[in-house]
Image (cartoon, rainbow, N blue to C red):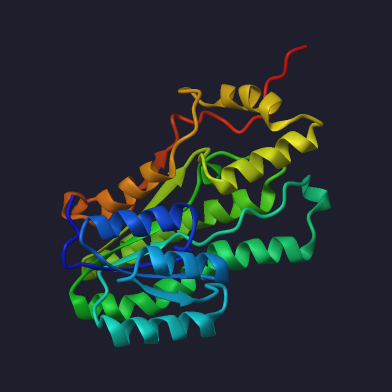
Amino acid sequence: MDLTGKTAIITAGASGIGRVTAERFTELGASVCLCDVADGALADVEKALPDALVLKADVSNSGDVANLYDAFSARFGRLDILVNNAGISGPTKHVEDVTDEEWDETMAVNVTGQFYMVRKAVPLFRQAGGGCIVNLSSVAGRVGMPMRAPYSTSKYAVRGLTDVLAVELGEINVRVNAILPGLVDGPRGQRVMSEQAAARGMSLEEFMPFFLHNISMHAMVSMREIADMAAFLASDMGRHISGQSISVCGNFETYRGPKFAT
């Protein structure tokens, strides 16, 4: 894989999957612009990736997104890759307990944020004669997950957006795909699993063996695996891959409740 000479925007790129993706793209020769909302993480990644353009931006705010693209265009001028990684996990609650604010916030970041980023990217892709969009969905956007209604719904919506964009933008040589991570061994995955465990009165260590029965390979996936898939799709190796929702999950069969011993 080679991204030499390509420019990329990665949202929520200061930590987690976004940071690992920014590091991987940099290793492969890309020039990277990343944004995030966490000041501490932004300061840390700016030291780690001194050649990257590091910006504070909330993707659910169209004004922030416009400012991000202004700064990006002033620095690079050309866009080749957009990785819509920004997302929040939302609440872990039964659907009747989810508040208006929790629902709206999850949709705003996970779906509307991707729309705002794509809307500003398309004119740059037209100028460049093509490009690549990688949207982060989730296995929760392929099979429903109990107690995760806002998140799962938002990730189904990301797949729908991906399908529409792939058809609409194919004629201008823009490829659009979604990555569906499974249970990721990172800060968010650990937090969500801890919440699931707590909801059942269990420790994380007690809970995990029961949860992993849903995964054929009985394992979590690494953030680097997600970054590698994004890099593959963005590289010339993926030049005719578009409109696909690709799971990196160890074959996550279902989001049934964990099977507990009786």
* Residue 65 image position (x, y, % from top left): 47, 79
* Residue name at image x 48 percent, y 51 percent: 137
Task: Give above or below for 227 relative to 51.
Answer: above
Q: Nearer the viewer, residue 53 or 88?
A: 53
Q: Is residue 19 left or right of residue 74?
A: right
The answer to whether any part of residue 146 appears in the image is no
| Quarter of the figure with the C terminus | top right
* Residue 165 image position (x, y, % from top left): 37, 64
* Residue 10 image position (x, y, % from top left): 39, 65
* Residue name at image x 68 percent, y 46 percent: 148
* Numbered-mark total: 0
Q: Nearer the viewer, residue 241 or 89?
A: 89
Which of the 4 image quarters holds residue 210?
top right
The answer to whether any part of residue 109 appears in the image is yes
Task: Give above or below for 166 relative to 43.
Answer: above
Q: Is residue 150 left or right of residue 222?
A: right
* Residue 12 image position (x, y, % from top left): 48, 64
Which of the 4 image quarters holds residue 19?
bottom left
* Residue name at image x 77 percent, y 64 percent: 100
Task: Give above or below for 229 relative to 11.
Answer: above
Q: Nearer the viewer, residue 176 or 237?
A: 237
